[in-house]
Image (spheres, grey):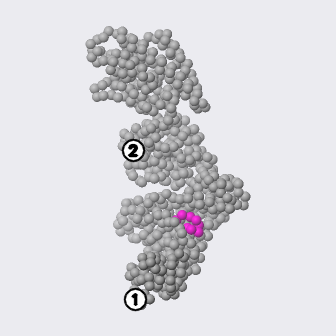
Amino acid sequence: MKDLAKWRQDNGHYLSASLNWLRLRLEALAQQTEALPSAPSHRFFGRRSSPETIRIEPDSRLNKAAAAREQAAAMDPPPALHLLADQLGLSVFEREVVLLSVAMELDTRIPALCARAMGNAAQIYPTFALAMSLFDDPSWDALSPQRPLRFWQIIEVNQSDTQPLTAAPLRADQRIVNYVKGLNSLDVRLSLLISPAVGQADELPASQKATAEAIAARWSRTNGSAFPPAAVLLGVDPAAKMLVAQSVAARFQRDLYRIGIDALPVQPADIENLARLWQREAALVPLMLYLDTQNDKGAPENHLALDRFVTRAIRSESMIFIGSREPLAGASFHSQVFEVARPTPEEQNAEWQQVLGALPEVDRQAAAARLSRQFGLNCSEIRYIAASGSAEPLDTLGSRLWDQCRDRSRPRLDTLAQRIDPRATWDDLVVTEDTQNLLQTIVAQVACRGTVYSQWQFARRMNRGLGITALFTGESGTGKTMAAEVIANDLRLALYRIDLSQVVSKYIGETEKNLQRVFDIMESGGSILFFDEADALFGKRSEVRDSHDRYANIEVNYLLQRMETYTGLAILATNMKGALDQAFLRRLRFIVPFNFPSPAERRLLWQKVFPDALPTEGVDYDRLSRLNLTGAGIHSVALNAAFLAARSGTRVTMPLILQAARTEFRKMDRPMSETEFRV
């Protein structure tokens, strides 16, 4: 609408003319009613038996009012009442019934006129019987549940048990009252459930743009001749699917709103009511709806509610998107599936180079290549990150962009994983030279995979195995978790440890769903996936003797397949390498051993374990290195010795360290000789 203020002013003039015309018709009907002879039965019931037999005789005032109303209606665009009738299929008579019901909210003189027209002082409200007498060309089927007035809930019929339908009070829905007044805001009942789509669909990359064009072309071919199919958007990235949906909505000049599957009601009557409200709203605003199943917990009642809602909502050319990770099984509504993926690394690289145009060409190309290789971001996210970092000095811009990309890609895993803040560095890690070389090779492969896969085109020859998977194996406490922290710190990526207590479920199929969610969310590339105690998940498949064995093997089979398609860095840690399925070992890129530390390594660990701020005295590192402890054990002894010193108010001395070491040996049930702990 070009000039909303001018249209609202003209719409107000039309409403004033319509109310004046309505009042004159009510007055004319009241005069004819009052001129009728009163019959006892009429007085008893307070109404006429056949109100439709009375017809209003137009006079000069009515003719002038009708002409003024008709002249006011010749506005462009038409007044809201006419738009309502066109959008919802109202007849002229039904449109006037709406006017009569709305007038009660706009003009305080209308109730008294209704009472006079019906010959009953207590009946200060409009009824269908009144409308039949008041307007030309009345139609008895206007109050049918299938006609627009009641089907779209435009009016409410407040009928008591003993009251005929024609004598029941009519009341206009508040949303309709606002619409007729020119206030086209979202129905408050819907605003509690749906919300405007967040973000803005600017120019999409070619891969996503092609998907948006395919959806728009499919819906354009419908042309009102059939119900448009729901567009099911498949993919792991909810932001990418939302951007494609917003792009399609913009092509049809509609606003996009979102509702989560868990917000849908489950009772059939509530679903029917919500579907009708949505259909009505989509015709009046207009809107498109994005049904998000990203956080679907798999509840059967939610899927049934989704099926019922969409089946009913698309019957009125309502355009609906359904965002899902996987195809909808058993849906009864007509749908078409579209795959939506994040922009390709090449598209991300081009977008980075465009938004970093202020940088020198060499720096721009290097930054774009580095960021697009590691992170899987949408173009809108890239633009946002670049804009927020535009004020950064050039010497720190690259580092700042990397941190923002990592934070933007941070997964939302709720209770399925624990985020570890990586603090350990290479200086803190004490391992053999071979182990350290393998760890540094892992870091190098993560940093260089864009060159190998994209620039050298290895990815064109491979459809799986693009990720990097490493197994850290060794006794508990030998540094496996610390090594994962070191790698995350070096690569400046977030580290997430999978919580097996939350992932593994006793219910059939739930473990696979939890793992799928973990892998899908982590695909953005800003984090490292760390499976501690991996033998609990990646154990050997067993001979099938009962249903438990069969479903346990299904879990292992799923992991085998998903690990091959995962494109990020996954680290598995176990102290039971022999318990792992051999098929996993074949798919691992690296197997990194963490051996029990030698005396020389233990001496180095003791030297590193005490912070510089800790007051120590007379620490004999050679003697301490002879204690058979892992790195974790040494850390535990040092910490306990510090607490002993803090309690006694002294420095950390050898007697305190040996006392803490004796406690650690007893805790671990390790054989010991008291001579080892004597000062």
Instruction: Find the magenta span and give its range.
Output: 488-495
**Residue 186 percent coordinates (x, y):** 48, 37
> Left or right: 211 with respect to 478?
right
**Residue 561 visible here:** no
Horizontally, residue 81 falls left or right of residue 543, namely right
Per the rendering, the mark at residue 324 is none
Residue in the image at 51% along x and 66% along y: 421
**Image height check: is 53 above or below 228?**
above
> Quadrant of residue 492 in the image?
bottom right
Q: Position of residue 212 (x, y in %)?
A: 58, 46
Q: Which residue is mark 1?
A: 674
Q: Could you say whether the residue bearing mark 1 is in a helix, strand or loop?
A: helix
- The numbered mark at residue 265 is 2
Q: Quadrant of the C terminus?
A: bottom left
Q: Would residue 171 be seen by someone viewing this image from the given angle? A: yes
Whether residue 262 is in magenta: the answer is no
Q: Residue at horizontal 45%, vertical 40%? A: 190
